[in-house]
Image (cartoon, helix red, strand yellow):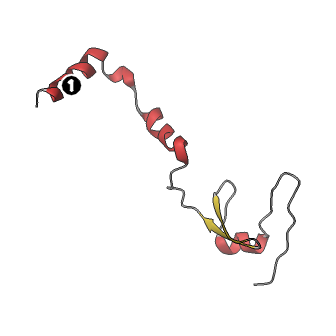
């Protein structure tokens, strides 16, 4: 693979050269993790789509959770039943 040179924009953005994108099967929206090796060397990892995205990882659970399925009394009864164990 040939050496590729890209420029850093004023907003700190870098384009990944097309031959590297194709070889790594990168898609738009995919997350890359950067690791600083030295002041002049960086390592870039393609993250797994299943990797948690910080606090936003809980949003998938929050969307699926529907508090209307059970009443507050039902939830409290379940919690109180656990106290008797």
Q: Relative to the observer, which residue lies in front, 53 or 39?
A: 39
Which residue is disc 1 drawn over? 78
Above or below, 65 relative to 36: above
Q: Is residue 26 above or below residue 66?
A: below
Residue 31 picture location, percent across and down = 63, 57
Observer-nearest of 70 and 55 = 55
For this view, does 14 lie left or right of residue 74? right
The image quadrant where one finds the C terminus is: top left
Tell whether 54 sits left or right of 68. right
Instruction: Name the residue at 51% across, 55% down.
Output: 51
The vertical placement of 36 against 10, above or below, is below
How many marks do you count on the picture? 1
Which residue corresponds to the image point at 25% horizontal and 20% vertical from the top-left?
76
**Callout 1: SS:** helix
Residue at the front extreme of this rendering: 39
Residue at horizontal 22 percent and vertical 25 percent from the top:
79
Quarter placement of the N terminus = bottom right
Residue 70, by quadrant, is: top left
* Residue 49, quarter of picture: bottom right
Vertically, is 40 above or below 50? below
Where is residue 14 shown, x and y percent of the image? 80, 61
Q: Nearer the viewer, residue 45 or 68?
A: 45
Residue found farthest to the bottom: 1
Mark 1, Cα crowd under 10 Å, few <14 / some 14-19 / many 20+, is: few
Snapshot quadrant of residue 3: bottom right
Residue at 85% across, 69% down = 6
Q: Is residue 71 left or right of residue 26?
A: left
What is the x, y in percent for residue 35?
Answer: 64, 66
């Amino acid at each position: 693979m040939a050496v590729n040179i890209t420029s850093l924009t004023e907003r700190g953005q870098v384009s990944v050269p097309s031959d590297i994108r194709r070889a790594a099967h990168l898609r738009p929206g995919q997350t890359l993790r950067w690791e600083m090796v030295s002041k002049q060397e960086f390592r870039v990892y393609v993250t797994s789509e299943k990797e948690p995205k910080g606090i936003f990882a809980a949003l998938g659970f929050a969307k699926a959770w529907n508090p209307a399925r059970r009443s507050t009394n039902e939830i409290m009864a379940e919690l109180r039943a656990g106290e008797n164990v």
